[in-house]
Image: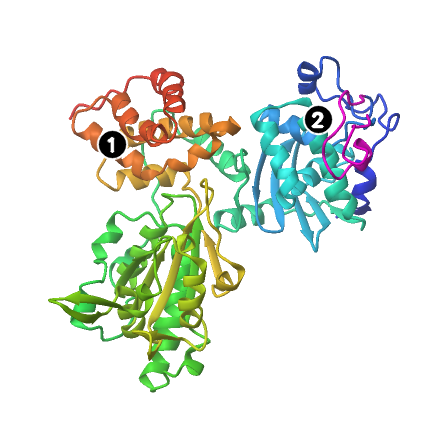
């Protein structure tokens, strides 16, 4: 195993003459933008920068002073993005990627950072060219630095030369110059371990880039099977959950039993890694530990605090967060209480409400209060949409120790040991509201529910009884629409309007005899049309109209 140390900030600050002719130093895609051959360290900028971190570009924020800066090797990352030769997924502190080196060979790398420093670059084979080290560092900068991400997004949407220079300078001055320590560069990357980490959901998608694992696995499957083979791969076995092997042993009230999602729900459920991880948690914390304590009479707040379950599910709209909570209820036999939050939600949604009935003021329990006091799964949907003062005031003590709420504003009610709190929030949509740090910290586990893989997506649609060919056709259209929207910064946010619901709607219309393209226009395209009719027209003309006609099988 080879290991070296390299100061990446020094490597990134390349000046004219440092790149020799025997190394690949050109950035071809810039030629069309810039109007001449673009070489690392050899082109000067025509226009002054406006980025605040380069103070020499402006004098007292008045007349800009032109400054000569060099194209840095971070531009190679943008070259890979432009050529679609970079695949990547990301976690909180690192990025796993596969890219085509400027000299032509394929490079596999994991870039890891800690305390703001790039501390390790792991490769399958030690690279010799500096460009192979700066591409992962630039990707990591895009992951860790908000300005780098913004400029990367601008580049994908517009591709202007000024954006390229700003990106190069921002990677250097705002990210790599802060990484003064020498990064460890090693050839000890084990690809199989990374594949396992990706498949288990420890990594999420990188904006505008495909997953290296997904692309590789799909390519292998395409080679193994004839093109006309339609046999569907079997999903994970959940028969044990369907057959009641994970039911929580507890006596629920008769009204509570009506709230339990029936086990038949699991017949159409496509399990995701988070389902198994959450079931493991519920089996241990509730089914084993909490049940034992309850049977011994140990139900006081200070005695149950170690095993309470509070989790936050976040992700794009329509990724199955609510469906996951329903599946957990079906598998455990626990009652499900669904509480929807919005900006008008008041504290009485938690503590109970007073209503006027027949001219008299009558106190009524809410779903939250009943589930909190009697036990069950409390599903707090879109918790981030609620007024944060209401959330912190009414829920902080309810979710975390000392575990109580004030029923009707004055009667103290302790949390039932069998109460599981699952909150959900959509992210990535325009106007997304974020949880304040105090409340978010109440959830020790925060699970990102990612968009399903193509095979899981199609399996999800067919589990509703729809034909696989029809499901694959709709999924193909969905992917093309998503790609068109995300290719332009002006329409990228509209992609968040699409979900599996629109695809199910299209299949429903097709099953009623509607033409496939018309069905897609009335559902998938319509999801965009309600926010931007012009963008929807563009999708209809450039995507839907160019799809092949769907010919259903004759039975």
Question: Of the residues under marks 2 and 1, which one precedes in the sequence?
Answer: 2
Where is residue 345 shown, x and y percent of the image?
34, 57
- Number of labels in the image equals 2
Question: Which mark is drawn over residue 507?
Answer: 1
Q: Could you tell whether 255 is left or right of 427 in the image? A: left
Query: Magenta part of the protein: which range?
Result: 43-66
Quick one: which residue is furthest to the left in this view?
358
Report if residue 512 lies within the magenta region.
no
Q: Which of 211 and 373 is in front in this view?
A: 373
Q: How crowded is mark 1: few (under 14 residues within 10 Å), some or many (20 or more)?
A: many
Where 277 sits versus 450, above or below?
Answer: below
- Residue drawn 75% across the image and 22% down it: 47
- Residue drawn 70% across the image and 29% down it: 76
Where 28 sits versus 212, above or below?
Answer: above
Please tell me whether mark 1 sits on a helix, a strand or a loop.
helix
- Residue drawn 40% across the image and 64% down it: 280
Quadrant housing residue 468 = top left
Q: Can residue 333 be seen in this view?
A: no
Q: Could you tell whether 321 is left or right of 188 in the image? A: left
Q: Could you tell whether 256 is left or right of 24 in the image? A: left
- Residue drawn 71% across the image and 45% down it: 121
Question: Which mark is drawn over residue 102?
Answer: 2
Specify the color scheme. rainbow
Where is residue 358 shown, x and y percent of the image?
11, 67
Report if residue 53 lies within the magenta region.
yes
């Amino acid at each position: 195993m080879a290991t070296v140390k390299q100061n990446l900030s020094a490597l990134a600050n390349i000046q004219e003459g440092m790149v020799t002719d025997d190394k690949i130093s050109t950035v071809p895609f810039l030629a069309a933008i810039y109007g001449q051959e673009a070489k690392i360290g050899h082109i000067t900028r025509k226009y002054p920068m406006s980025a605040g971190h380069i103070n020499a570009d402006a004098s007292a924020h008045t007349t800009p002073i032109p400054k000569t800066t060099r194209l840095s090797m971070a531009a190679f990352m943008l070259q890979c993005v432009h050529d679609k030769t970079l695949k990547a997924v990301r976690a909180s502190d690192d990025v796993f990627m596969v890219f085509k080196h400027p000299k032509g060979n394929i490079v596999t790398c994991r870039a890891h950072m800690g305390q703001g420093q790039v501390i390790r670059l792991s490769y399958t084979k030690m690279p010799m060219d500096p460009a192979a080290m700066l591409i992962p560092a630039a990707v990591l900068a895009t992951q860790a630095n908000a300005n780098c991400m913004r400029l990367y997004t601008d580049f994908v949407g517009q591709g202007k030369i000024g954006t390229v220079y700003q990106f190069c300078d921002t990677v250097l001055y705002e990210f790599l110059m802060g990484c003064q320590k020498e990064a460890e560069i090693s050839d000890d990357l084990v690809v199989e371990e990374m594949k396992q980490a990706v498949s288990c959901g420890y990594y999420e998608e990188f904006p505008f880039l495909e997953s290296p694992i997904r692309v590789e696995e799909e390519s292998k499957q395409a080679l193994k099977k004839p093109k006309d083979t339609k046999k569907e791969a079997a999903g994970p076995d959940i028969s044990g959950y369907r057959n009641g092997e994970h039911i929580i042993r507890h006596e629920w009230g008769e009204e509570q039993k009506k709230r339990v999602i029936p086990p038949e729900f699991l017949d159409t459920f496509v399990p995701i890694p988070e389902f198994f991880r959450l079931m493991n948690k519920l089996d241990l914390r509730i089914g084993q530990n909490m049940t034992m304590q309850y049977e011994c009479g140990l139900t006081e707040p200070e005695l149950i605090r170690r095993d309470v379950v509070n989790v936050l599910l976040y992700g794009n709209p329509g990724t199955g967060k609510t469906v996951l909570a329903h599946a957990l209820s079906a598998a455990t036999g626990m009652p499900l209480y669904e509480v929807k939050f919005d900006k008008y939600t008041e504290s009485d949604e938690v503590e109970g409400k007073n209503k006027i009935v027949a001219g008299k003021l009558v106190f009524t329990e809410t779903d939250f209060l009943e589930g909190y006091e009697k036990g069950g799964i409390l599903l707090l949907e879109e918790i981030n949409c609620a007024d944060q003062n209401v959330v912190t005031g009414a829920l902080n003590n309810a979710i975390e120790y000392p575990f109580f709420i004030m029923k009707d504003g004055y009667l103290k009610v302790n949390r039932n040991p069998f109460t599981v709190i699952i909150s959900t929030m959509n992210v990535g949509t325009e106007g997304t509201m974020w949880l304040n740090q105090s409340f978010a910290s109440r959830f020790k586990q925060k699970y990102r529910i990612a968009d399903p893989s193509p095979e899981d997506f199609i399996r999800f649609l067919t589990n509703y009884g729809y034909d696989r060919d029809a499901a694959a056709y709709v999924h193909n259209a969905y992917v093309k629409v998503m790609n068109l929207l995300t290719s332009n910064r002006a329409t990228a946010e509209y992609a968040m309007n699409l979900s599996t619901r629109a695809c199910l709607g299209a299949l429903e219309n097709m099953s009623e005899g509607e033409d496939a393209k018309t069905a897609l226009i009335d559902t998938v395209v319509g999801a965009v049309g309600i926010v931007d009719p012009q963008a929807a027209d563009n999708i209809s003309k450039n995507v839907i109209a160019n799809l092949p006609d769907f010919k259903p099988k004759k039975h």
